[in-house]
Amino acid sequence: MVKIAPSILSADFADLKNEIIKLDEAGADLIHIDVMDGNFVPNLTIGPAVVKAIRPYTKLLFDVHLMVKNPDDMIPWFANAGADIITVHAEVCPHLDKTLAAIHKLGKKAGVSLNPSTPESVLEYVLDNLDLILVMTVNPGFGGQEFMENQLSKIAKIREMIGSKPILLEVDGGINALSGAEAIAAGADILVAGTAVFSGGDYRSNIEALR
Ligand code: DX5
Ligand code: ZN
């Protein structure tokens, strides 16, 4: 079954506690948390204090997407704040294997994300050391951008690379009912969606529509 991970980047930040509770009640599978540092991407969003503050309001897994230049420094902060999955960008990890091991050492699941211009080949030698691959289908930084169709072939190639390994394949950016179906057909397991989940305010039907 397709899993839906609403991105709280599109939530009402003034009411984050209730937004989390509503997403949980609406049938979300994971909570996707977009951490941006104003450096790796041109936007500044959520820090560990916020993750810690919302942690008591759901048992759903916190899927923390680190769009930051120095993830090694920040991994322990988010692990202590209550992250369950910590995903780093391959583009900023010269010692990717070591970074993934550091996440595992903290008892968390480790993910690797690829920008649209990054080839899937960077994953080849870390495939046995990760739990999740996150394919960006927009250039990271903002919600509400258009899905990049040219990433579908990358999703399909990664699905093939994964084979029978226990690795989740997640897609993030511009996901709606149509692009979501394309991503799933190409091999994705988890759809991240901000705009599509939050628009109109009926989170349950929006999540069902994506599923
Ligand atoms: C983009 C973020 C996404 C984004 C998705 O930089 O990583 O998670 O919030 O938002 P939508 O679904 O609106 O593209
Ligand atoms: Zn994200």
Image (spheres, helix red, strand yellow):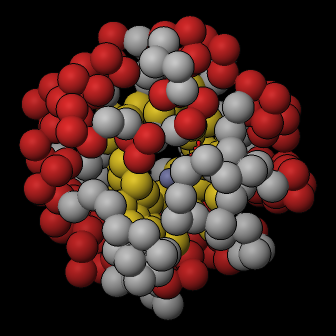
Residue 14, by quadrant, is top left
* Residue situated in front as seen by the camera: 4 or 177: 177
Q: Is residue 47 above or below residue 194?
A: below
List x then y, in percent, for residue 101: 36, 70
Q: Where is the N terminus found, in terms of image quarters?
A: top right
Q: Quadrant of residue 209?
A: top right
Seen at 84% across and 35% down, the residue is: 182
Q: Compared to 114, does 209 lie above or below? A: above
Residue positioned 31% across, 17% down in the render: 22
- Count the marks: 0
Q: Residue furthest bottom?
A: 94
Residue at the image point whose x is 57% and y is 64% from the top = 140
Quadrant of the rendering where the C terminus is positioned = top right
Residue at position x 48%, y 12% in the image: 202
**Position in image of residue 103 (x %, y %):** 31, 64
Is residue 161 visible to the viewer in this orientation of the structure? yes
